[in-house]
Image (cartoon, rainbow, N blue to C red):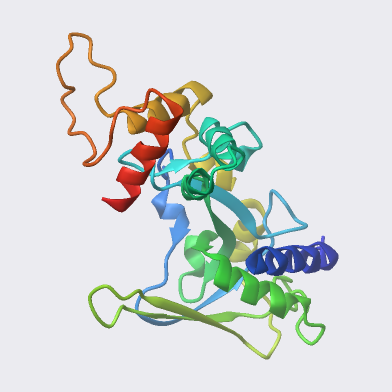
Amino acid sequence: MAINLDAIKQKLQAMQQASNGGGGNKANEHMWKPVVGKQQVRIVPYAFDKNNPFQEMYFHYEIGKRTMVSPSSFGRPDPIVEFAEKLKKSGDKDDWKLGKKIEPKFRIYAPVIVRGLEHEGVKFWSFGKQIFTELLSIISDPDYGDITDLMNGRDITVEYTAAEKEGAFPTTTVRVKPNTTPATTDKEIAERIVNGQKDLKELFTELSYEEMTDALQKWLDPNSGSQDGTKPATTPITGATTATKSEDISSAFDSLFNS
């Protein structure tokens, strides 16, 4: 089944309009990250969603000591998202800003085969909004179309540049090849592409609603959880205050994000 171009165009439009206005990874072996220099990949159809190879996942990077995948990635309620929504609806400007800060951040995952490493099978390439928007724009261009097509798709050159100085960020650029080519002519590799993919969402550990709630509460009050009145063994986050009232919650967030 070919990629749904209408859905891709609608997603691109929605992202452009928006821009105008955990759990840990259990399987790093199934992920691909570019290294410094140029490399070539081919996005392939996703076996578990043949209409769309681009899968959105949401993560909490600010809550606690580890990254947590948001249950919203799986279509389930997330207590941190619910709390963020309450802050944004409070009518207070600072609360709204704080609510935005604790919202989960999204990453896009696309199944790829890496040129020169095709024998390793399909990997997942993770990237952010900028690259996602660029790829959607290319796919929406009738001169390019479905670059993920197994027979008539196009490879992508990914160039990764390290940060030039302290405090700077690395950059990643993409360039889609002008010529169409088969994803592979090797039957074994073709079999791995079609039948050997992993379900992306099974590669992440989803915490329960109760575990997410507990993580949020401990983040708001690092000294909570003590049974005898003493401080817990873990070191509390500098600047955090005990958030027992709505005004204390705002103060706690403010201290955390400005420390």
Give 186 or 132, whichever is nearer the viewer.
132
Where residue 139 sits, quadrant-wise, is bottom right
State whether residue 166 is above or below residue 67: below
Name the spot of residue 163 as percent of width and height, x first: 30, 78
Q: Residue furthest right?
A: 6
Q: Residue furthest bottom?
A: 178
State whether residue 229 is above or below residue 64: above
* Residue 184 visible in this rendered orientation of the protein: no
For the point 17% across and 8% down, which residue is it?
A: 228
Give 35 or 225, whichever is nearer the viewer.
225
Give 154 or 75, whichever is nearer the viewer.
75
Q: Is residue 153 left or right of residue 65?
A: right
Q: Is residue 143 left or right of residue 215?
A: right
For the point 41% across and 53% down, which residue is it?
A: 29
Give 124 or 102, whichever is nearer the viewer.
102
Name the spot of residue 208 as percent of width and height, x first: 50, 25
Name the spot of residue 25 as percent of width and height, x first: 42, 45
For the point 35% across and 74% down, which residue is it?
A: 169
For the point 32% across and 78% down, which residue is it?
A: 162
Query: How many callouts does the rendering have?
Result: 0
Q: Quadrant of the N terminus?
A: bottom right
* Residue 168 visible in this rendered orientation of the protein: yes
State whether residue 155 is above or below residue 91: below
Where residue 109 sits, quadrant-wise, is bottom right
Name the spot of residue 79 as percent of width and height, x first: 54, 30
Q: Residue furthest top?
A: 228
